[in-house]
Image (cartoon, rainbow, N blue to C red):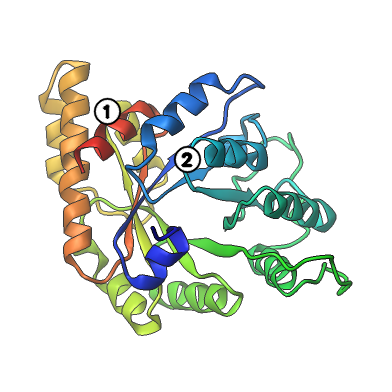
Amino acid sequence: MLDFRGKIESGEFCITCEISPPRGPNSDDFEAKIKGLAGKVSAVNITDNPMLSVRMSPVVASFLCLRNGVEPIMQMTCRDRNILAITSELISACALGIKNVLVLRGDMPKDGKPQGVFEVDVAGFLKIILDLNQGLDFRGNQINQKCDFFPGAALNPFDEINNLRANLLGKLEGGAKFFQTQPVFDVSSLDKFVDVVQEYKANVLVGVIIVASEKTLEIVKSFAKGMYIPPKLEEGISKFQSKEDKEKFGIDFALELIHSIKNTGVFRGAHIYSPANEKLILQLVSRL
């Protein structure tokens, strides 16, 4: 059976999703979610203190994924670590069998708490991974075994076209092998992005967020720079009264969108978010 890297490199359409580590040392609920995803997705992203919330280390949480038969994509941010800590955690992840790493800048700290580190940017972080894969630390010293990471990065498909092209090219040259995007709600809004993806033959998984309430939609709108939100989504959410009907609509909408993404023949997969209710992810992937 192909692993996530093998599926991406063979051109298989992949389904990934995003689960946050537990807020404390008890991992029972987290592991139950992971077990529910086993065999239903290609890999699971493990977030890194998302939205500045305190969570279990993504290294440990990713290992728990492996222990429960699910391949992790370990997210790591530039925000929380200096070069030494980045290198140490990557070596630890390698020792535990974790191979997929999604490099992110990280959410900006608010009011100075916590303080962001940002000793390296995404390009610098990718360079550390590239060096470790060649058996070197950030000083160029040899380590006792080469790592075998499969690095990825994020893309904003609605960025200004020149910025998008430069961002994608820079991350490809830095060693990124796959990309996951911010949420998308209509494939027809991606014409320019499709052209860039095809131009650079990039392995892109398009973000799909399950919108199951007006509150979630309002949160999406708050960061939806350039993002097109179709009237069908807004009208559908407001039409239903019960929580269950809204959730069903949100899942149905996401399923239809995933099929549209696959039908483009351009993208390597879909990446599913449901930050307000991660259990909806299990319901969605069970229907794929």
Q: Is residue 91 above or below residue 29?
A: below
At horizontal 61% and vertical 30% (from top left) the residue drawn is 53
Q: Quadrant of residue 12?
A: bottom left
Q: Return the residue nearer the eye: 286 or 221.
A: 286
Decide if residue 76 is on the left or right side of residue 228: right
At horizontal 19% and vertical 25% (from top left) the residue drawn is 246
Q: Return the residue nearer the eye: 53 or 30.
A: 30
Q: Quadrant of residue 100?
A: bottom right
Outermost residue on the front side: it is 1
Q: Position of residue 258 (x, y in %)?
A: 22, 52
Q: Position of residue 255 (x, y in %)?
A: 19, 44
Q: Position of residue 198 (x, y in %)?
A: 32, 79
User: How dense is the environment of label 1, judged by Cα within 10 Å: few (below 14), some, or many (20 and up)?
Assistant: few
Q: CA distance from mark 2 to mark 1?
A: 35 Å
The residue pinned by badge 2 equals 69
Asked if residue 262 shows in the view, the reply is yes
Decide if residue 195 is on the left or right side of residue 54: left
User: How dense is the environment of label 2, judged by Cα within 10 Å: few (below 14), some, or many (20 and up)?
Assistant: few
Count of numbered circles on the image: 2
Decide if residue 92 is on the left or right side of residue 279: right
The residue pinned by badge 1 equals 214
Kindly identify the amino acid type of the residue bearing the numbered disc 2: Gly
Kindly identify the amino acid type of the residue bearing the numbered disc 1: Glu
* Quadrant in which the N terminus is drawn: bottom left
* Quadrant in which the C terminus is drawn: top left
Q: Position of residue 252 (x, y in %)?
A: 15, 38
The tag earlier along the polypeptide, 2 or 1, is 2
Asked if residue 160 shows in the view, the reply is no
Mark 2, secondary structure of its residue: loop
